[in-house]
Amino acid sequence: MRAFFALDMGVKRQIKRDGGNARGWYDDELTKQRRDWKQGLDIGMPASRSWAVPDDHPSNANLDGYNRLPPPRLLPDFRPTIVEYFEAST
């Protein structure tokens, strides 16, 4: 996670969550109607329940959207670590 949050803001903005997809990076959350001084990354189990299916495949869309992760060329171990964590948690 340190490596992810150390990425350039431009890289993180490419996977920013939005009105159509609640998963991804964010830095604009509010608490008591004031902007928080934090960044976050929302990730969840894919709707297909299979990490072998590409994150943005239609079968992975659910109420929250689909996972948005940094490009593997920048953080090659990031997605495999996320997958390992979720598989150990289920």
Image (spheres, rainbow, N blue to C red):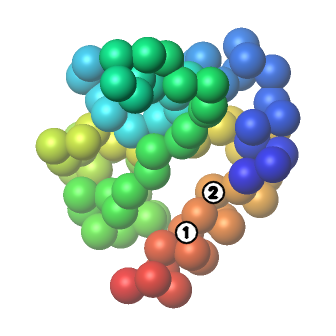
Considering the numbered disc 1 on the image, is that residue within a helix, a strand or a loop?
helix
Query: Is residue 18 visible from the viewing direction of this image?
Result: no
Residue beneath disc 1: 83
For the residues labelled 1 and 2, the Cα–Cα distance comes to 6 Å
Query: Looking at the picture, which amino acid does disc 1 mark?
Result: Val
Q: Which residue is at the front of the view, 53 or 43?
A: 43
Q: Position of residue 78 (x, y in %)?
A: 71, 55
Task: Please tell me which residue is depicted at 27% across the width and 38% down the height of the picture.
Answer: 65
User: CB atoms at circles 1 and 2 under 8 Å apart?
Assistant: yes
Task: Please tell me which residue is depicted at 62% across the width and 31% down the height of the picture.
Answer: 38
Q: Which residue is at the front of the view, 88 or 76?
A: 88
Neighbour class for label 1 at 10 Å: few (<14), some, many (≥20)? some
Query: Looking at the picture, which amino acid does disc 2 mark?
Result: Arg
Q: Position of residue 32 (x, y in %)?
A: 35, 24
Taking the view exactly as shown, the residue that stands out farthest to the front is 32
Compared to residue 28, the image places residue 84 above or below, namely below
Residue beneath disc 2: 79
In the visual, does 36 lie left or right of 80? left
Compared to residue 77, the image places residue 33 above or below, namely above
Q: Position of residue 15 (x, y in %)?
A: 54, 26
Task: Please tell me which residue is depicted at 65% across the width and 37% down the height of the picture.
Answer: 70
Q: Which residue is at the front of the view, 84 or 35?
A: 35
Considering the numbered disc 2 on the image, is that residue within a helix, a strand or a loop?
helix
